[in-house]
Amino acid sequence: MLLKLICARVLLSKVAIRGAFTLGAVAGTAGVVGLCALRRAMVEKRGGAA
C-alpha cells in the first residue's frame, strides 16, 4: 500500500514538473513573440525600416 502511494506521488510530481515546464515554455514563447511584435510595431510607427 505504501509503495503504491509513493509511486503515485512520484508519478504526480513528474506530471506536475512536465506541466510546469510546458507552461514555462509556452509563456516564454508568447513573451518573445509579444516583444518582437511590439518592437516591429514601434519601428513601423516611427516609419523606419526594421
Image (tube, rainbow, N blue to C red):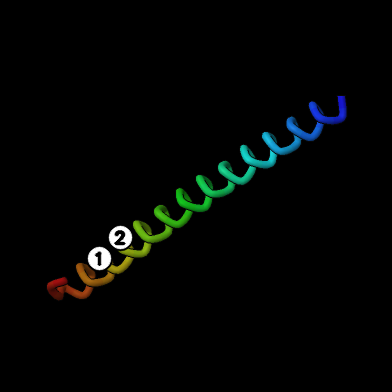
x and y percentages locating residue 19 in the rendered image: 57, 42
Residue shown at 53%/47% (left/top)?
23
x and y percentages locating residue 22 in the rendered image: 50, 45
Q: Which mark is residue 12?
A: none
Q: Are marks 2 and 1 in contact (CB under 8 Å)?
A: yes
Q: Please tell me whether mark 2 sits on a helix, a strand or a loop.
A: helix
Residue shown at 22%/72% (left/top)?
43
Residue extending furthest left? 49
**Residue 12: which quarter of the image?**
top right
x and y percentages locating residue 27 in the rendered image: 48, 53
Question: Which is more toward the observer, 45 or 2?
Answer: 2
* In the image, residue 49 above or below residue 25: below
| Residue position for label 1 | 40
Residue extending furthest right? 2
**Residue 14: which quarter of the image?**
top right
Residue extending furthest front? 3
> Quick one: label 2, few (<14), some, or many (20+) residues within 10 Å?
few
x and y percentages locating residue 21 in the rendered image: 53, 49
Quadrant location of the N terminus in the rendered image: top right
Residue shown at 37%/61% (left/top)?
32
> Quick one: label 1, few (<14), some, or many (20+) residues within 10 Å?
some
Quadrant location of the C terminus in the rendered image: bottom left
* In the image, residue 50 above or below residue 1: below
User: Distance from label 2 to label 1 (Cα)?
Assistant: 5 Å
Q: Amino acid at mark 1?
A: Arg
Residue shown at 69%/41% (left/top)?
13
| Residue position for label 2 | 37
| Relative horizontal placement of residue 3, taking residue 22 as reference (left or right) | right
